[in-house]
Image: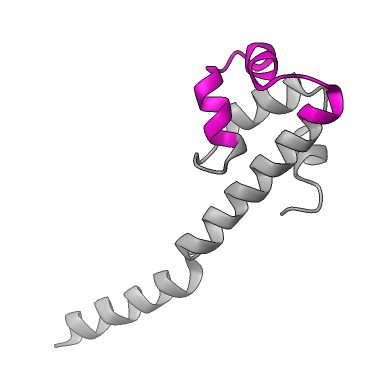
Amino acid sequence: MLAFASLAYAGRLVAEHTPRIGVMQELHKKIGERIRAFRLKQGWSQEELADRCNIHRGHMGQIERGEKNLSIDTLVKVSKGLDMTVSALLKGIV
């Protein structure tokens, strides 16, 4: 019985400290919107930014729509492609 109680307690701890899926999806969407805004400010097409970042243009579209979970590597590629730091890209979002 003690093992089940410990598992239940551990499950509650994980749930309390794990972001909800909706929260993460909203974060992806905000990052994508910010990337799109910076791209448009530069006057670049999505394909042009994708080429600058060495990312497939379809993947860039998914990123901008908030459909993809960006890896740190991809976030660095995109920020470099936009000629900015990762912290500048994420400023005010996280």
Q: Residue at point 85% right, 23% down? A: 42
Q: Is residue 37 left or right of residue 2?
A: right
Residue 7 rendering spot, x and y as whole percentages: 25, 76
* Viewer-proximal residue among 86 and 63: 63
Query: Is 40 colored magenta in this rendering?
Result: yes
Q: Residue at point 63% right, 16% down? A: 47
Residue 44 rendering spot, x and y as whole percentages: 77, 19
Instruction: Let me know if residue 71 appears in the view.
Output: no
Task: Please determine whether, in this image, residue 50 is positioned above or below residue 59.
Answer: above
Q: Residue at point 81% right, 47% down? A: 91
Task: Please determine whether, in this image, residue 78 is positioned above or below residue 16.
Answer: above
Magenta range:
39-63
Q: Quadrant of residue 75?
A: top right
Instruction: Let me know if residue 15 appears in the view.
Output: yes
Q: What's the colour scheme?
A: one colour
Which quadrant is the N terminus positioned in? bottom left
Magenta: main secondary structure: helix
Residue extending farthest left: 1
Residue 94 rendering spot, x and y as whole percentages: 71, 54
Q: Residue at point 69% right, 19% down? A: 49
Query: Is 57 colored magenta in this rendering?
Result: yes
Task: Please determine whether, in this image, residue 42 is positioned above or below residue 32.
Answer: above
Q: Is residue 77 left or right of residue 41?
A: left
Residue extending farthest right: 41
Task: Please determine whether, in this image, residue 9 is positioned above or below residue 37.
Answer: below
Q: Quadrant of residue 52?
A: top right
* Viewer-proximal residue among 24 and 10: 24
Residue 89 rendering spot, x and y as whole percentages: 77, 38
